[in-house]
Structures are given as structure tokens and as C-alpha cells.
Image: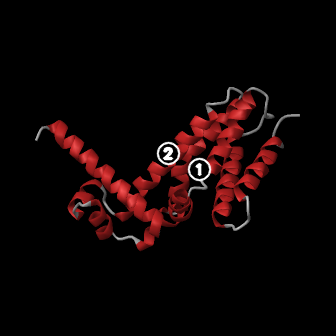
Amino acid sequence: MTSTARTRQREETRRILLHEARALFAAKGYAAVGLSEIVRCAGLTKGALYHHFDSKADLFRAVLTQVQEEIGAQVATAASTESDPWKQLTTGCAAFLRASADPVVQRILLIDGPAVLGWHEWRAMDEANSARHLHEALSTLVETGVLPPQPIAPLAHLLSGAMNEAALWSATTTVPDALTDTIAALDRLLAGLRAA
């Protein structure tokens, strides 16, 4: 087998493991899924799994990273449909809340993510993926005078925390139209930040 073929095979094995683990973690939750079940569903061996991942937590971390990257791409795509920086921010924030309404995202990103990896690691991963975009958007709005001059880091953390909490609430509430109401509340919150 050529090195190119081996590389493709390794990539395909990793893709299959991530796909099966993601489906199982989303359906059952991290704690209820064992490595034996993952490799059985993937049609692979534990040796193949351990070739790519050190542990179940390491595999979960890779699944979580994949979910975060997908949400980041969805948010960036939605925001890029707008030319106005303010509309980019509000559209991107709404896109995050819509993406977070997906039960797979709720389970992996919002419920199991902090519980499995711990708050500090989960926050660091969030910072590396989505919080960076929020920080950049807010910086642009301050630089252009849409938002009054202020430290960006605390504002980005406040908004990120509010959106994560709102997404968690939307995931667990039985209130009708929770997502629509949450996006409307976020729009009002953001509007209050604008410069007079």
C-alpha cells in the first residue's frame, strides 16, 4: 500500500470514528456510550480507535471541536450575507442561537461539553472557535463608532455567556416559540449597546 493510500485510509478511519461517536454521543449522551459500542458501530477495532485517540474523552474532544467548527462556519456564513457590520453581528448571533437549537449541538456542545471536559477546557475551546469571531465583530463596531469605546474582552465574554445560557435555556424549556423569543430578546439586548 502506498503512503498516499495509507494516509487516505487513516483519514477515512478517523472520519468513521468521529461520525459514529458523534451519533452515539448525541443520541445517548457521553456517559452512556462505551468505546466497544463505538468501534462496533464503526466496524473497526479498539486498536484502530486508539491509533487515533488516546481515550473516550479525547474522541469526545474531537467530536466537540468538529461541532464547534461547524457552528462557527454557519455563523460566519450567515454574517457574511450582510454588508453592514451591525447586521453582521446581529445576524451571526441569531445564527448561533438557531444552530444551538439542534438537539445534537445541545447535547454535545452545551450539556456534555462542559461536564466531560470541565469548564476551563470547554471555555478555552469556545474561545478558540467562536468567541474570537465575536471579539473581532465587536472590535469593528467600536472602531467604526457603532458601539461606544469600551474594553472588548469583557463585552465579548458577557455576550458569549448570555448566548450560551440562552441556548441552554432554549434546549430545556417547554415554552412555545422559545427560539423566536430568545432571538428577539437578544436583538433588544444588543440594541441597548449601540452608541447614542
- Residue occupied by mark 1: 99
- Few, some or many residues within 10 Å of mark 2 (<14, 14–19, 20+): some
**Along the line of sight, the residue nearer the viewer: 27 or 140:** 27
107 relative position to 59: left or right? right
Query: Which residue is located at x 72 percent, y 27 percent?
Result: 84
x%, y% of residue 137?
Answer: 66, 35
**Helix, strand or loop for disc 1:** helix
Q: Quadrant of the N terminus?
A: top left
x%, y% of residue 102?
Answer: 56, 56
Give the CA separation, mark 1 to mark 2.
9 Å
Q: Give the label on residue 88, or none.
A: none
- Residue occupied by mark 2: 70
In the rendered structure, which disc, 1 or 2, sits on the residue that comes first in sequence? 2
As drawn, which residue projects farthest toward the front?
176
x%, y% of residue 142?
Answer: 74, 32
Q: How is the image coloured?
A: secondary structure
x%, y% of residue 150?
Answer: 76, 38
As drawn, which residue projects farthest toward the bottom?
32
**Helix, strand or loop for disc 2:** helix
Q: Is residue 78 above or below residue 110?
A: above
59 relative position to 196: left or right? left
Query: Which residue is located at x 18 percent, y 36 percent?
Result: 4
**Along the line of sight, the residue nearer the viewer: 165 or 27:** 27
